[in-house]
Image: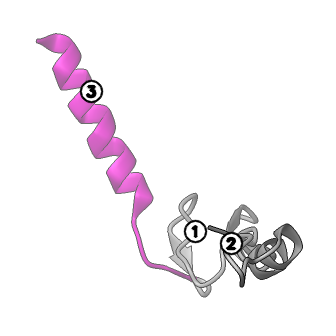
Amino acid sequence: MVNRMRATRSHRNNRRSHHALDAARMSACSKCGAPHQNHHICMTCGSYNGRTVLDLTAKATAKAKKIAAAKKK
């Protein structure tokens, strides 16, 4: 049995032409100049919209202490 209303390759592919993903939009951080995603915190310096939101230096020192403690054991 043959499908009468078959979607041809060209019709199927025309429909799927809008399914492609766009690349993420990136901005330069106003403090450090590193690229970050629009409307997101800069993960290099922890700032958003010109003010510091995350204290990444405290996180880095805590992580270093944890690694040093694990090496001692």
Which residue type carries mark 3? Answer: Ile
Question: Against 9, is 38 above or below?
Answer: below
Residue 27, image quadrant: bottom right
| Label 2 close to label 1 by CB (< 8 Å) | yes
Helix, strand or loop for disc 2: loop
Residue 48, image quadrant: bottom right
Q: Which residues are magenta?
A: 51-73
Earlier sequence position, callout 3 versus callout 2? 2
User: Is residue 28 something one can see in this rendering?
Assistant: no
Helix, strand or loop for disc 1: loop
The residue located at (82%, 73%) in the rendering is 8
Residue 11 percent coordinates (x, y): 83, 79
Give me the disc on residue 31: 2
Distance of label 2 from label 1 (alpha carbons):
9 Å
The residue located at (22%, 14%) in the rendering is 71
Question: Against 68, is 1 above or below?
Answer: below
Give me the disc on residue 42: 1
Q: Which residue is mark 3?
A: 67
Which residue type carries mark 2? Answer: Lys
> Magenta stretch mostly in which secondary structure?
helix
Residue 12, image quadrant: bottom right
Q: Quadrant of the C terminus?
A: top left
